[in-house]
Image (spheres, rainbow, N blue to C red):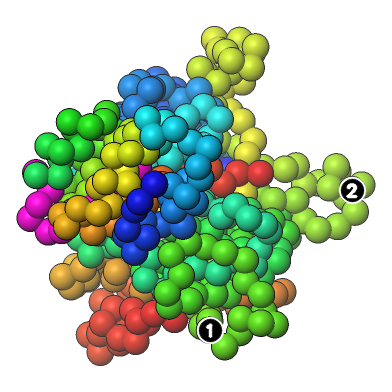
Amino acid sequence: MEFDATKVDAALAEILGHSEFRPDAEFPVVVTSAPGLLDQLLGEVSARGRIRHVLTPLHAVSAWLPLSAIAEFSRQPLVVDMELPGESGVAHL
Amino acid sequence: MERVREALFLGGPPSVDGSGVRVAVVDTGVDAQHPDLADSVTEVRSVVPLSPSGTDRSGHGTHVAGIIAGRGVVDGRFRGIAPGASLLVIKAFHQLGRGYSDDAARAVLDAVEAGVDIINYSASFEPSGGPPPWKWPRAPRDVLSRAVEHAIQSGVLVIAAAGNAGPRPGSVGRPAVLSAALAVGSLDWNGVVGGASGRGPVYKEADLREPARYDAVTDAATCTEESKPDLVVPGGELPTMSGAVRMRGFPLGIVAPRSREAEALEGLDPADPDAPYARMAGTSQACAIATGLAALAFEYSRRQGLNLGPDPGKAIRALMMEAARPPKVGTRDDYGRGSLLWVNLRATIDDCVASDARRRAIIEGPQLRVL
């Protein structure tokens, strides 16, 4: 699947590079827009997937998106960064 | 909590209790009906998409909230550090204590928007791919780091657990690795940095997108090091000594409020009035204790008329760093600036009230720069 490797983090790049995933397989992803373009990005992401969070101060939106859409968004000029959300755990023994 | 309070408040109990200070607890939710927390918790939210209730089914969030601002209604021995503080609890982790970074980022942003003074983040992202030492990007672009940076730039003090991946070097997790966050490690009951407490240094590389293992032999030239954690406080860890001694005198964990929902899940009777507390240990608990101390410092500074400048969060962080003292054992990579007692923090604030030159040196001085 063709994607812009300069805009995606290593974990997402690994998934995009795996031929075993179908294009409609959905993954959570954080998409960051260029400043001032969040509304436009939000509209486009909403049309392709399910919104998890709108992170306005960060010009970002997180959503479940099909792999094909993730690859397409990485090639769009309004997108500056994409990442797979990391997992975090509480810190007690 | 009784033992922790005795240790932290050597020289006498504080004259303040955190009143007027708003603290966000980004965690597993809270038992807001617990008698010790009913008046402290002013709002509960959830940002976990599949768990819209702020109910705490883990017990971790309730324990952390109780350490910060539990009122000791059921048993005064287990009063929190700053029982006058008000808590906004935002659930970002599910009942197994795990969560995604975009949920946590949303919680941090919501806390900033709500106007809190402090964010308590008793959780840690520990990268996959192997044990520490870890290497981190110099300018992190991940969503949680950006949210925490936004909070700090908005004047909020972000206090984060160093994580429990110690004692290997380079074992401080995210977001505690961020330069401007206050990273808290834990002391055991002997006043020694706990074996599991995350250690420095923090290895950073310029162009790295994701954390990876640090190979000290081959990668040294591409990395720089930063000092972390920033300070240490008790976290209820067992001393590193023989099992027999552990069993006799050093129970694992700090006693603080227990979520009744978690009790029910564990098969205990949630209505049992004799069991409203639980023991937990680690840098989560240490983080909450540091947050309680920060809340006391906010209120005390305001009452003394101390000018904290345009960025109160950074100012309180600088005061806490200045007041920390090296513990009897360990290195700077173990304990950062040292352990923190209220008597030293109060004295540092008093110094700044008495001397504007001292205030400027601490609050506006080089201590605020990246260490």
Whether residue B141 sits left or right of residue B236 in the image: it is: left
Which comes before the other along the chain, label 1 or label 2?
1
Task: Tell me the amino acid under the disc marked 2.
Answer: Gly
Whether residue A49 sits left or right of residue A43 in the image: it is: right
Q: In this view, does B145 lie above or below B200?
A: above
Q: Nearer the viewer, residue B155 or B66?
A: B155
Return the mark for residue B243: 2
Whether residue A33 sits left or right of residue B342 in the image: it is: left
**Where residue B80 sits in the image (x, y, percent)?**
47, 42
- Residue B368 appearing in the image: yes
Quadrant of the image occupied by residue B274:
top right
Q: Find disc 1 in the rendering and name its residue.
A: B222
Does the magenta run of residues contain A36?
yes
**Where residue B350 sits in the image (x, y, percent)?**
33, 74
**Where residue B122 sits in the image (x, y, percent)?**
48, 47
Q: Which chain carries label 2?
A: B
- Residue B106 appearing in the image: no
Magenta-highlighted residues: A28-39
Residue at figure coordinates x 34%, y 53% from the top left: A3
